[in-house]
Image: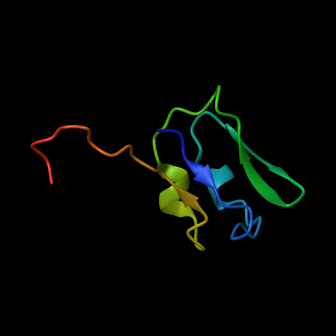
């Protein structure tokens, strides 16, 4: 899943840019922005974010046997 960046939380520190293997993250108006066409969905950016502004939202299971 492509990570999602909360622009309200992002402080523009650039840590995510430093760890992004395909260099798919850039700053726009001092907020991180992911170019989804280049994102490899590795999650390194979310792990590196000091303010937890980057989240990877996984879809809920549609399996009726899962609670």
Query: Which image quadrant for residue 37?
Result: top right
x%, y% of residue 57?
45, 50
The quarter of the image holding the C terminus is bottom left
x%, y% of residue 40?
52, 32
x%, y% of residue 64?
15, 41
Left or right of 4 on screen, residue 25: right
Residue found at x 53% / y 39%: 2
Above or below residue 57? Residue 13 is below
Return the residue found at the far top: 37
Return the residue found at the far right: 29
7 or 32: nearer the viewer: 7
Left or right of 28 on screen, residue 52: left
x%, y% of residue 56?
47, 51
Chosen colour scheme? rainbow
Residue found at x 68% / y 50%: 17
Return the residue found at the far front: 64
Residue found at x 26% / y 42%: 61
Residue found at x 74% / y 68%: 8
Above or below residue 48? Residue 43 is above
């Amino acid at each position: 899943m492509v990570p999602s960046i909360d622009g309200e939380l992002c402080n523009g520190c650039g840590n995510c840019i430093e760890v992004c293997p395909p260099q798919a993250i850039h700053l726009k108006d001092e907020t991180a922005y992911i170019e989804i066409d280049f994102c490899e969905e590795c999650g390194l950016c979310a792990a590196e974010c000091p303010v937890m502004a980057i989240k990877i939202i996984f879809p809920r299971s549609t399996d009726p046997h899962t609670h």
